[in-house]
Image (tube, rainbow, N blue to C red):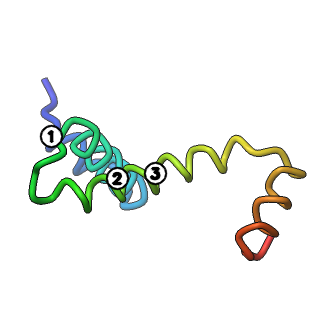
Amino acid sequence: MTTLVQKLAELPPNLVQEVDDFVDFLVAKHLPPSSEISEEMQQRKHDIEQNRNIVRFSAQEWKAYCEEYRLPS
């Protein structure tokens, strides 16, 4: 049986980063609010959720979002 460490070692670096981001998201989601690192993790959770929402945008919604937040489209 392959261990998680072995599986991670077989992934390309970009996928390892995605796994790392997802683990951070899970930790932030389940940390109690009073935790010392909770604020940083909550911000990371928020950023990940924002990115997930952006992916769901249509082209028109993306353009409006970029204009609203002054981002290049």
- Residue at the spot x=28%, y=38% of the render? 29
Q: Is residue 73 left or right of residue 7?
A: right
In the image, which is nearer the foreground, mark 2 or mark 1?
A: 1
Image x and y of residue 21, in percent:
34, 52
Q: Which residue is mark 2?
A: 21
Could you say where residue 3 lies in the image, as x and y percent from the top left?
A: 13, 33
Residue 14, quarter of picture: bottom left
Which label number is shown at residue 1? Answer: none
Observer-nearest residue: 29 or 52?
29
Disc 3 residue type (three-letter):
Ile
| Left or right for 25, reference 70 | left
Query: Nearer the viewer's eye, disc 3 or disc 2?
Result: 3
Q: In this figure, what is the number of numbered marks?
A: 3
The disc, 3 or 2, on the residue closer to the chain's N-terminal end is 2
Q: Nearer the viewer, residue 15 or 34?
A: 34
CB contact under 8 Å: marks 3 and 2: yes
Image quadrant holding the N terminus, namely: top left
Determine the secondary structure under disc 2: helix
Up-down relation of residue 21 to residue 29 (above or below): below
* Separation (CA) of disc 2 from disc 1: 19 Å
Disc 3 to disc 2, C-alpha distance = 8 Å
Alpha carbons under labels 3 and 1: distance apart: 19 Å
Disc 1: which residue: 32
Q: Secondary structure at mark 1?
A: loop
Q: Which element is circle 3 on?
A: helix
Find residue 59 and report its horizontal and vertical position in percent: 86, 51
Residue for badge 3: 48
Quadrant of the drawing holding the C terminus: bottom right
Side of 45 where 64 appears, left or right: right
Tell me which residue sits at (83%, 44%) in the image: 58
